[in-house]
Amino acid sequence: MKTSDNQRESPVVHTRDLRMRYGSTDVLKGVDLTVGPGEVVALLGPNGAGKTTTIEILEGFRKRSGGEVSVLGVDPDRGDEAWRARLGVVLQSWRDHGRWRVRELLSYLTLFYEPYRERVFDPDELIGLVGLTDHADKRVGALSGGQRRRLDVAVGLIGHPDLLFLDEPTVGFDPEARRGFHEVVGRLTGTAILLTTHDLTEAEKLADRIVILVSGRVVADGTAAELADRIAGEAEVRYRLDGVEHVLSTADSTSYVRELFAEHGEAVDDLEVRRASLEEVYLALVRDSEHVAVSA
Ligand SMILES: Nc1ncnc2c1ncn2[C@@H]1O[C@H](COP(=O)(O)OP(=O)(O)OP(=O)(O)O)[C@@H](O)[C@H]1O
């Protein structure tokens, strides 16, 4: 679903001036965050920026110091079981369930969701979706790190959540497992997702919108392309003409390429148009924001 469509409906997550203080340290300094129905939002930021703290407040695991928070229309500090059953949570690490078997655990968890949800996942369907079919009868404690993480994702999804929190979901995945996970997320429909990650390729691939948090403040919020426009209005165009390589920067690469072909047609070879990568955009925004935070 497109961001513009989502924003017309009431958001599944909405915070205004969210604040968190540990002792005398302010770690969230007025965070405004919105996630629309079915929207996938990536929360990025350096270590210690406040991403996990934000997610834990939204999940109802941590009590905020100030500001307004609504998750699925409810203040997380007052969320009941029925509210919790609409959420899926994949934390950074779980330490429980080692003696359970994969299918057994997921089947058991459906019992919690069934009284509240119209639809829960069939455990075997979900096991297939996360690529654990060959391990369905294994004890959880005997899974590899990556297999364990796939199970974590399955645990988060079993109740067919309206909103799924994923805190660094693919840490420890091999490239194939990561791709498998991205496919799983891509196939989910009707579930809004708020994920944290340090993998910018993952953020760009999965997210409709990217929110960058630095030192407890949102410093950027938009699609990857919108963020790129903020720091770099120009794209780099490379091509080869009569065997000679040309490289130039232009603010209107579409018109440039159109004119290039109109003039030279098939003589143009190896054409490449490159905008700033999300990594370049991210590093520039974080650098600027940290500079402002230090000099303020
Ligand atoms: N229980 C706590 N008591 C005191 N300070 C805390 C507590 N939990 C987190 N902090 C501090 O709050 C700040 C934000 O931490 P948080 O875990 O939210 O950051 P993060 O953006 O998720 O970082 P990372 O990318 O490293 O996971 C950090 O400076 C951290 O040391």
Image: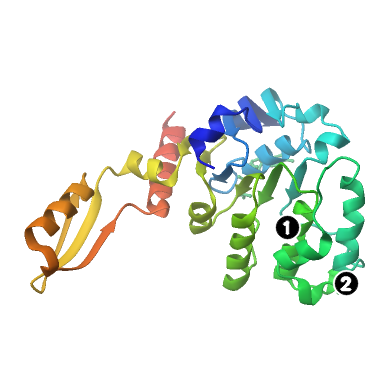
Q: Mark 2 points at which residue?
A: 139
**Is residue 51 shown left or right of residue 296?**
right
Q: Relative to 183, is 114 above or below?
A: above
Mark 1 crowdedness (10 Å alpha carbons): few <14, some 14-19, many ≥20? many
Residue, x 60% and y 62% (percent of image)?
183
User: Is residue 216 positioned above or below 98 on the image?
Assistant: above
Q: Position of residue 227 (x, y in %)?
A: 40, 42
Q: Which residue is drawn at 18% across and 65% down?
A: 239
Q: Quadrant of residue 194?
A: top right
Residue in the image at 68% along x and 23% along y = 66
In the picture, measured across the screen, residue 2 lies left or right of residue 156, that is: left
* Point 76% across, 48% down: residue: 160
Q: What residue type is labelled 2?
A: Arg
Q: In x, y percent, where is residue 117?
A: 83, 42
- Quadrant placement of the C terminus: top left
Residue 24 appearing in the image: no
Q: Position of residue 280 (x, y in %)?
A: 38, 52
> Relative to 45, does residue 218 appear above or below in the rendering?
above
**Front in this rendered view, residue 231 or 103:** 103
Residue denoted by label 1: 153
Element class at badge 2? loop
Total number of numbered discs in the rendering: 2
> Which of pointers 2 and 1 lies earlier in the amino acid sequence?
2
On the rendering, which quadrant does ligand 1 occupy? top right
Q: Residues within 10 Å of mark 2 (few under 14, many from 20)?
A: some
Q: What residue type is labelled 1?
A: Val
Image quadrant assignment for residue 59: top right
Instruction: Please provide percent x and percent y for residue 101.
Output: 89, 68
Location of residue 181 (image quadrant)? bottom right
Render colour scheme? rainbow
